Image (cartoon, rainbow, N blue to C red):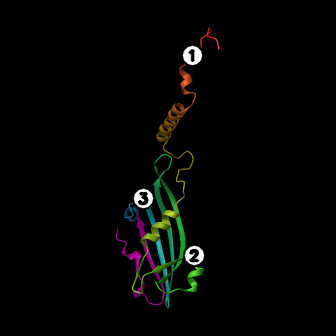
C-alpha cells in the first residue's frame, strides 16, 4: 500500500485549510512490523491549516481494527474513532499557540515535509483497548477448554499439597 499521501509537503501548501484523506487496511499496519493487527479498515482525514508561519493539524480516523483476542487468540474487531490536534513549528521558531495545543511537533527546517504515518499508526494503536477480548461467550470454546485444562494441571503441579496425594492413611497407623 502506498502511503506517500500521508506525507504532507508543508512548504508547497498555500495559506488556508487543506484536507487529505486516506483509507488504511492491514497492509498499513504490516509496514510497522505489526503482526498483531489481523485486519483493518480505517478512514483517515488530515486537516492542515496554514496561516503565515504557523501550521495546525487535526487528524481524525473512523473505522475498525481486528486484533487477536487476548483470551482465545481468535480475531476480535474493535471500533476505532479519534481526533487529535497538534501544531507544527520549525526548529528555531516558537509560537505561543504551541503552548495551548495538545501536542507540538518541531520539524528541522522550513523545507520539511510532515510525515503523518507514524502519528496515524500511534493514534490507531492507542485507540484500541488495553484488554482485547471477546465479550463473554463469544470466545473460541475449544481454545477456552484447552486453556482451562492447562490451568488445572498447572495448579495441581504447584500446589504445596500435591506431595500428600501419594500418602494413604491406614486404619492401624498411629499419628
Residue position for label 2 = 102
Residue 157 or residue 59, whichever sits in front: 157
Quarter that holds the N terminus: bottom left
Answer few, some or many: residues within 10 Å of disc 3's Cα (few below 14, many 20 plus, some between 14 and 19). many
Q: Quadrant of residue 82?
A: bottom right
Q: Check contact, mark 3 vs mark 2: CB within 8 A.
A: no
The CA distance from mark 3 to mark 1 is 56 Å
Q: Earlier in the sequence, mark 3 or mark 1?
A: 3
| Mark 1 secondary-structure assignment | loop
- The image position of residue 93, as x and y in percent, is 50, 87
Q: Please state the extent of the stretch shown in magenta in the rendering.
A: 1-25
**Which residue reaches farthest right?**
175
Residue position for label 3 = 39
Quarter that holds the C terminus: top right
**Nearest-to-viewer mark from 1 and 2:** 1
- The image position of residue 60, as x and y in percent, is 51, 72
Amino acid at each position: 500500500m502506498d502511503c506517500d499521501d500521508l506525507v504532507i509537503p508543508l512548504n508547497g501548501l498555500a495559506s488556508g485549510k487543506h484536507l487529505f484523506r486516506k483509507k488504511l487496511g492491514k497492509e498499513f499496519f504490516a509496514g510497522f512490523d505489526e503482526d498483531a493487527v489481523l485486519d483493518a479498515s480505517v478512514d483517515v482525514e488530515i486537516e492542515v491549516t496554514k496561516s503565515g508561519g504557523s501550521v495546525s493539524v487535526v487528524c481524525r480516523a473512523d473505522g475498525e481494527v481486528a486484533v487477536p483476542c487476548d483470551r482465545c487468540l481468535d480475531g476480535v474487531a474493535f471500533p476505532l474513532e479519534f481526533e487529535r490536534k497538534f501544531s507544527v513549528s520549525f526548529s528555531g521558531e516558537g509560537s505561543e499557540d504551541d503552548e495551548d495545543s495538545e501536542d507540538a511537533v518541531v520539524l528541522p527546517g522550513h523545507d520539511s515535509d510532515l510525515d503523518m504515518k507514524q502519528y496515524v499508526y500511534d493514534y490507531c494503536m492507542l485507540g484500541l483497548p488495553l484488554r482485547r477480548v471477546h465479550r463473554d461467550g463469544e470466545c473460541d470454546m475449544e481454545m477456552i477448554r484447552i486453556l482451562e485444562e492447562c490451568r488445572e494441571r498447572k495448579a495441581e503441579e504447584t500446589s504445596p499439597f500435591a506431595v500428600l496425594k501419594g500418602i494413604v492413611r491406614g486404619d492401624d497407623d498411629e499419628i
